[in-house]
Image (cartoon, coloured by chain):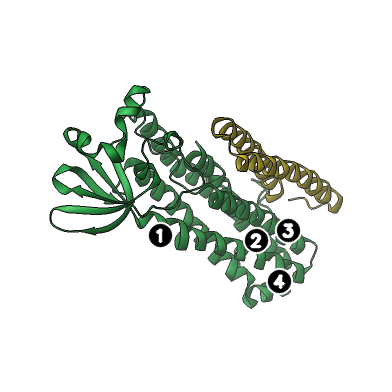
Amino acid sequence: MEIPYTISTRPDTGLWNAKIGIWLFLASEVMLFGGLFSAYIFLRIDAAPGMWPHGLLNVPVGTMNTAILILSSVTVVLAWASLKMRRYRAYWWYMLATISCGVIFLTVKLAYEWPQKFEHFGAYIKPEALGKYEKYLGNERRAEKGMEPRIEITGHLHSQNAKEYEVALDPVNAEPDNPSMDRPHFFPLPVTDKIATIEKEDVERATMFLPTHSAYFASYFTITGLHGMHVLGGVLVFIYMWLPVSKRLYQRNPEHLANRVEVSGLFWHFVDLIWIFVFPLFYLL
Amino acid sequence: MSLKAFHIVFIIFSTLLALGTGAWCVWVDLVEGAPIYLAGAIASIAAAIALIIYGIWFYKKMKRLRIIT
């Protein structure tokens, strides 16, 4: 039995089935991501003054990834337009470009951005021990300037034993009295070779930059991880539509393939639109 | 909404993002005084202009080709 309304429109809705299906699905996605964005915004508003991390993400890399996703939206719509004009060869190349953009985005995210965070370490110092680590925190100068105290020492975990952590310090803790360290650095500064020894009994909690580190990283990994899974899903669908199996559908019924590309293109645009909100929220603001 | 219409909406949002990123770069440059951010602002505004030109080109092309869904 043939599935009806895959190409022609239903008389009652004026739409073919897959288009209604994708918009219903995207409506549910709006609720999913909307809930997560709301959670992020409320967590941020509720954070104590000066306690919400800022400038921990690599803005140039994030900007490049944003440009790649915008480019992929252009190529997918051109792939669809090529099918509408019955130019299969052009469709094939545009689809390949779209798949490549998705793969590059995921590679940058999973092989560069996330691992950089996993290598980073942060130790929150107990309030009563903050004075002991003044040379790494610079809180006396900050208090004079009316700024919130630093409570975390960050860097790369050099080594640890039962009593101590040895941390290769981030510049912010290596030169805490340098006024330029009062601001976030959107071009990340490399870890210094200055090593700090932190006693474990002075530490409230210590962890790598994982979701367990803070509400900020929990939100960051949840939202970018979920977004990444959507990108992966889109790439897999596009690969299917790029393979010879889809050429056979094109030869049988080109409009059917064009409709399939349109609904997957709608999904892809939605995923890219989510990133348009993720980028400024997490990287810039 | 068709892919064509959603693409135009997406390009509008991308343009707004590029303009916002440009404004953000100008703000950081004013605070930090780092010329690299000024370069970022110029690149962002150039990207916004390119997106506007592309959006207009896309709309006209779709209209000319009469790709209506």
- Decide which of tag 1 and tag 4 comes sooner along the chain: 1
Q: Position of residue B30 (x, y in %)?
A: 59, 30
- Three-letter residue code for mark 4: Tyr
- Decide which of tag 2 and tag 3 comes sooner along the chain: 3
Residue located beneath label 1 in the image: A115
Q: How many neighbours does mark 2 have within 10 angstroms: few (below 14), some (14-19), or many (20 or more)?
A: many
Answer above or below: position of A222 versus A152.
below
Q: How many neighbours does mark 1 have within 10 angstroms: few (below 14), some (14-19), or many (20 or more)?
A: some
Image mark 2: chain: A
Residue located beneath label 2 in the image: A261
- Decide which of tag 4 and tag 2 comes sooner along the chain: 4
**Residue A59 visible from this viewpoint:** yes
- Decide which of tag 1 and tag 3 comes sooner along the chain: 3
Residue located beneath label 3 in the image: A78
Task: Please identify, in this view, whether the residue under mark 2 or under mark 1 is nearer the observer.
Answer: 1
Asked if the residue under mark 4 is in contact with the one under mark 3, i.e. CB atoms within 8 Å, the reply is no
Question: Which chain, by letter, is green?
Answer: A
Quadrant housing residue B47: top right
